[in-house]
Amino acid sequence: MAKDITTRSENYSQWYNDLVKKADLAENSAVRGCMVIKPYGYAIWEKMQATLDKMFKETGHTNAYFPLFIPKSFLSREAEHVEGFAKECAVITHYRLKKSPDGNGVVVDPEAKLEEELIVRPTSETIIWDTYKNWIQSYRDLPILCNQWANVVRWEMRTRLFLRTAEFLWQEGHTAHATKEEAEAEAKKMLEVYADFVENFMAIPVIKGVKSPNERFAGAIDTYCIEALMQDGKALQAGTSHFLGQNFAKAFNVQFLNKENQLDYVWATSWGVSTRLIGALIMTHSDDNGLVLPPNLAPIQVVVIPIFKNEEQLNLIREKIEPFVKQLKEKGISVKVDDDDSKRSGWKFNEYELKGVPVRVVVGPRDLENNQAEIARRDTMTKETVPFDTLAGTIENLLAEIQKNIFEKARAFRDSNIRTADSWDELVDILDNKGGFVAAHWDGTVETEEAIKEKIKATIRCIPLNNKLEDGKCVLTGKPSKQRVLFARAY
């Protein structure tokens, strides 16, 4: 099977698009800007979802579900919030169709106009805080630690599968607290949960930081983020956690009696990650041969391919591999035995390489004679022969080694692509010719941040947590600065 994938060096963007489609992850749908997530792509999302869901529940959160539709008036209650999402909103104005006058189709029924227009959920703060006012009367009702798994719609004009689509899947946590300190601690805690997941399951190194005022979530006091670096030198925001202060509580009049028996507004957070993480997974690890998936998230961790000429040989191989496959499954390792005789072994090798299966095991008649199997690892494309007696244990250790190896490789790339710039020319030169993160001084004003973005299409990705204070001069204005921030071009 020919992979027919554009190489990264030839056209990185096309390589990404080719890989998403050829590896059967997703495809464009009939609805402009929307995608169909295919079974293999959805299997990756399911593993992400299951892992994150467990992590959320271990930190005390529970799942709920809130409406897809939001009254338009809700968005206008929080000024920054509505300004941040207004251009991306899909609006429902009518609720019924009728036959067209010529009888050959349908048209919107003008008599079925909604009394109040509805917004298709771009994010759920407003509908959730309108609900929370019914749940909260006293400090005894707090904290509320809710998460929902849902789809959202943001009407993007320029779309790319997984990275930016009009509709996408995500989770959004929404918590309510009695004090500012509790809410800030929650926002920071969930940032750590995201960093843990992305580094230890996705094998992607991240930089933890706080967003600049111009880049923070609409309606937030502070937005904490994790930033990752893709192989083409562009940054990708991998997760955000927002300290919302009392903004939404005031907008929806959510008050409670505190321990001093006084009325106060509730303190809030929200946090989320989406299916764009699949895009991050692809762009961080994969190569010109196809996907490279971290074992912790691979739908198929091990594929076993018998090599046989007839049914008798196949039955002997099946008998030999059955105990080994059972051992792996008992260890919680997902295994697929592909003994389909309608496809050649070379086609299978190509297919599972393309799909990023971490370990391939090949067993043929000669291997049976020698009581061994050939194993190949996807990350390094190397092979070795292993005795059957130690095969299960070897593969278990190998999966852990692959997980660690692809993380270390990604971290080495990221670290080698963090540079410093002390002048405007240096900043532009690095971004134009090398890419990656650039640590540079900024005078702290929104005006300068916007001017930089306009001039060179780069943004402040974050102000790293525990950033060192350092006197310097803004690379654009020359005004005093107390610390460097990280600039990059980004997805």
Image: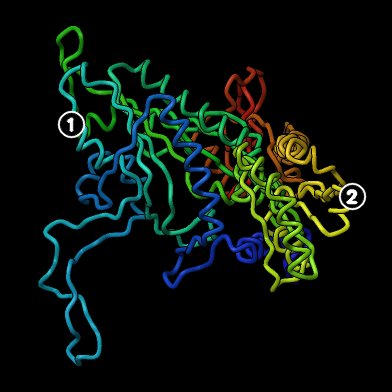
The residue under the point 66% across, 43% down is: 294
The residue under the point 15% across, 56% down is: 116
- Type of the residue with mark 2: Asn
Mark 1 sits on what residue?
133
Quick one: 102 or 402, which is closer to the camera? Answer: 402
Residue 156, how many percent across, how many down? 44, 59
User: For the residue labelled by badge 1, is the local secondary structure a helix, a strand or a loop?
Assistant: helix
Give the numbered dot on residue 414.
none
Neighbor class of circle 1 (other Cα within 10 Å; few <14, some 14-19, many 20+) is some
Quick one: 462 or 348, which is closer to the camera? Answer: 348
User: For the residue labelled by badge 2, is the local secondary structure a helix, a strand or a loop?
Assistant: helix
Give the numbered dot on residue 370.
2
Query: Which tag, 1 or 2, sits closer to the chain's start?
Result: 1
**Residue 452: quarter of image:** top right
Vertical position of residue 412 compared to residue 102: above or below: above
Question: Pointer 1 and pointer 2: residues touching (CB < 8 Å)?
Answer: no
Quick one: 318 or 432, which is closer to the camera? Answer: 318
Q: Is residue 455 visible?
A: no
Vertical position of residue 55 compared to residue 97: above or below: above
- Type of the residue with mark 1: Lys
Q: Is residue 264 left or right of residue 431?
A: left
Neighbor class of circle 2 (other Cα within 10 Å; few <14, some 14-19, many 20+) is few
Q: Report the quarter where the N terminus lies.
A: bottom right
Residue 272, how many percent across, how many down? 44, 39
Mark toward the viewer: 1 or 2:
2
Q: Is residue 449 left or right of residue 181?
A: right
**Residue 124: quarter of image:** top left
The residue under the point 38% across, 24% down is: 60
Residue 18, how many percent across, how many down? 66, 65
Which residue is the extreme one toward the bottom? 102
